[in-house]
Image (cartoon, rainbow, N blue to C red):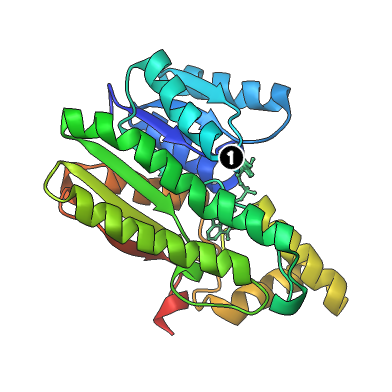
Amino acid sequence: MLKGKVAIVSGSTSGIGLGIAKVLASHGADIVLNGIGDAGEIETIRSGIEREHGVHALYDGADMSKGEAVRGLISATIEKLGRVDILVNNAGIQFTAPVEEFPAEKWDAILAINLSAAFHGIAAALPQMKKRGWGRIINIASAHGLVGSVHKVAYVAAKHGMVGLTKVVGLETAGTGITANAVCPGWVLTPLVEKQIADIAAREKISRQKAEMSLLGDKQPSRSFVTPEQLGGTVAFLCSPAADQITGTAISVDGAWTAQ
Ligand code: NAD
């Protein structure tokens, strides 16, 4: 389905981004991986994707907290692979604290990585998508793009911003063959959430398993984690012809979290 297309997935060295990159590769897209991590492990991931799916896979370590670096990731991809057809803005970080104790530098970092990076990437990628009359912008927001939770002021603000950004890009590209959508996952068991589970277990002096259940029970009525593979499937669907008219919207994959 995606043979001949080039997809950038920011923050794809682990978790959701890696799940999405693998599913897009399984549909034939060439992949640009991005993110932080051990060079040897990243090379194993990159070469594994090439071997398993018979596509080109490159790695670019651009720092998503820096607008110029994000724009550089787009231009380097165009230089090396000739195009960017699918841009998945997925890189993200988390920090929790009450608003009056929230460190200003954490606010700045979360806004830069979880929101501004998507703006810079979209702005740089759109012109060549418009020339070809096809493109897919997929912003990985969160249930926290639609509702709030205590102690996550920067994350919730950035993810709501991501949903707003998606609406405007959807409007500005409507009818051009380009679509822009946000995907809003509930809890997914990745390193970002592992830390929150460990924090609950330590704070409440309970086992890891009980902490997982407490995290899910609090928010996610299905009582099951969403998986990176399921999110990869959602992204692949948004890249399919069936989704040509789905644009400017937010799709929840959250076990009924935001239905409450
Ligand atoms: P993760 O920590 O496993 O992955 C985050 C990725 O972002 C990693 O590849 C990391 O290297 C990369 N990254 C972080 N800072 C970066 C930087 N400055 N430059 C480049 N890359 C950087 O987390 P995840 O859970 O897979 O999160 C992926 C996205 O999904 C995030 O935007 C997150 O907010 C969102 N999300 C996660 C959940 C969840 O429950 N895990 C739920 C909803 C939304």
Which residue extends farthest left? 175
- Would you say 160 lies left or right of 1 here? right
What quarter of the picture does the N terminus occupy? top left
Where residue 128 appears, as percent x and y from the top left, is 26, 28
Q: Residues within 10 Å of mark 1 (few under 14, many from 20)?
A: some
Where residue 243 appears, as percent x and y from the top left, is 20, 50
What quarter of the picture does the C terminus occupy? bottom left
Where residue 191 appears, as percent x and y from the top left, is 68, 51
Reply above or below: 27 against 158.
above
Where residue 179 appears, as percent x and y from the top left, is 24, 47
> Could you tell me which residue is drawn at 55 percent across and 46 percent down?
91
Q: Nearer the viewer, residue 217 or 202?
A: 202
Residue that carries the numbered disc 1 in the rendered image: 66
Q: Secondary structure at mark 1?
A: loop
Can you tell which quarter of the image residue 197 is in? bottom right
Q: Nearer the viewer, residue 211 or 8?
A: 8
> Could you tell me which residue is drawn at 39 percent across and 66 percent down?
252
Q: Nearer the viewer, residue 16 or 34?
A: 34
Asked if ligand 1 lies within 8 A of label 1, the reply is yes
Whether residue 251 is visible to the viewer of this picture, yes or no, is: yes
Can you tell which quarter of the image residue 156 is in? bottom right
Reply above or below: 9 against 253.
above
Which residue extends farthest top? 80
Whether residue 247 is visible to the viewer of this picture, yes or no, is: no
> Could you tell me which residue is drawn at 15 percent across and 41 percent down?
177
Can you tell which quarter of the image residue 208 is in? bottom right
> Could you tell me which residue is drawn at 30 percent across and 26 percent down?
5
Q: What's the amino acid at mark 1?
A: Lys
